[in-house]
Image (cartoon, rainbow, N blue to C red):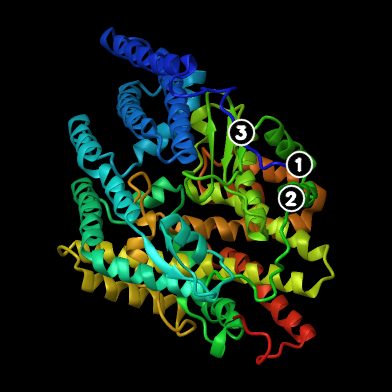
Amino acid sequence: MELPRWTFEDAYGDFDDARFTDALLNLDEILGEIEELLGSSGGLNLLINAYECGFEEANSLLAFCRCKSSDDTKDERAGATEAKIREKFLRLERIKEIIFEKIDALDPSDTARQTQEFARIKFLYDEHKSSWRAKFDAKERKIYEDTAASSFAPLYGVFRHLNNLIAVQATDKSGVKSVYNLSKCVGVLKGSPDAALRKSVFDGLVEYYDKHASLYADVLNLLQGFRLGEFRAAGTDILTPSLQQNKISEQAVTAMFAALGQRSDRIRECVSLRAKYFPQGKIYACDLLAPSPFASAEEIPYERAIETICEALGEVGEEIPKFIKMMLQRSWIEAQVRENKAGGAFYTRFDKFKQPRVFSSYMDTQAHMIQQAHELGHAWHYWIMRDLPALHTQFPMTLAEAASTFNEAVLRNYLRKNSADKNLLFDILWQELKSAANFMLHIGVRFDFEIAFLKAKQKGAVSTTQIEELVQKAWRGRYGDTTQDTEGFLPYFKLHFYKTDQYIYNYPYTVGYLLSQFLLGEFRRAGDKFIGTYKAFLRECGVMSVEALLQKHFGKDARTLEFWLECVDNALIYADKFKRLEERMKFNKSKDRAE
């Protein structure tokens, strides 16, 4: 089976396609219509309808730009076009604020509050009323928005330009030297079986970031300095904006990290249990995502990977494999390996056409099979919401990762159940330990560092020396002495620190991972009855908080330590299974270490 290649012929085609240019004109016409309505004191319902249409069009066009720029990183049209669309999107956001002001002016008994149009945006209006930005008037909001567009948002581009300069010369175990750009470096560190290459790439990155640390520090200081200035003006703390963006309370996040702290020794076992398989029984930062020493070299063709994914997810509900097959039939999946493609994988969707898309580069490994399941989880999440208004399908990161990581958990669970091969079972449990450590330790390091950086920045510019100290403290606070070194270049390497549309973009991944472990436990308990509750939970992810969803659909209180301990303990089951399997395999320290 040839690797799938996505198409946009049932959507916008290309940048010079009439469907795309017509859509741009349509967006302009919608914005013009809204301006006329505002000028003539047009009805609230008409304004809401026009705003929704504009949002749907703009969001779809932005998704298309992302697809095209990822499909060919040298296509310069994508960046230029995206910038123009983002300007229009910003106008829509201002229009939304005007709509909310008109609602504020309504009498509580006004019939305009009883219309379908108002009902569709009520959840957004309620969020607006309690928003940390509520203190700003229209003039102040516009000043910050304009400044953000001209001086804040472009900083992410500066970060990307800096990383595009990376050209690490690394040596593999055969002594072959090659030059690795950023995406190739990431690929090596995320799972190359070649220990010598992993270390060489890691050392090369250390050298590069040491040389350019001051430039990255400048960008970080500018980014967080802008944010802190806005937060001070709004009278809010450093965490609230992120909590509101991710629809979760401080009590829930605090309880989650308390649960991780209470189980820290057992979580660290997810690292130390693997250390014995490396030379001298020690694990370094470059080895944290290394594959199992017993990982099969057998390639997994894409067709077999999809069959396995469908069989696994078919146990949850027969509609999921049907959806995956439809994605393939409609050419909505990109999995080819080509020059000039962006690295990584993602899901997006065209709200206007009710179509999801999945981007990846499939390379015949078990890790890539799991990655396919992950992205297809995102796509199915949207698919079961596609009949809802586009505004209702914008789920936050805390909930976006629930369906994707649940897919991963179900797939690995299926592989364990259906294999008698001890080496394969070892490999799967090894991956479970990697995931557990990544989500419950590494994400914690990122969170602790970012909070510490923000607090330091409140006192003035943060130097590279301070950044190094903050990273070391955050790393040892989470990993303890389980690793021989630290990932000191983390603040410069990880793009999540530089995103301007997401703030404190780390802990939501831990929330999503732990929710997936909870959902897997519920699936085991409920069996065939699970799918109905699961779909109802997913369909409301765009309009309800994490706490409200869990309470409504599962009767759980996410603000309690007990709930998160349940989630963590579900994840730690894999460490216990790993130890039992080691006993059965009679691990020999002198023979079974990774090269």
Of the 4 image quadrants, the one containing the C terminus is bottom right
Callout 2: SS? helix
Q: Which residue corresponds to mark 3?
A: 385
Callout 1: SS? helix
Residue in front for this viewpoint, 227 or 434: 434
Q: Would residue 240 be found to the left or right of residue 384 on screen? A: left
Do labels 1 and 3 touch, CB within 8 Å? no
Q: Quadrant of residue 437?
A: bottom right
Q: Few, some or many C-alpha atoms within 10 Å of disc 1 (few <14, some 14-19, many ≥20)?
A: many
- The amino acid at mark 3 is Met
- Whole-percent x and y of residue 23? 44, 17
- The amino acid at mark 1 is Pro
Q: Which residue corresponds to mark 1?
A: 321
Q: Earlier in the sequence, mark 2 or mark 1?
A: 2
Residue 48 visible in the displayed image: yes
Q: CA distance from mark 2 to mark 1?
A: 8 Å
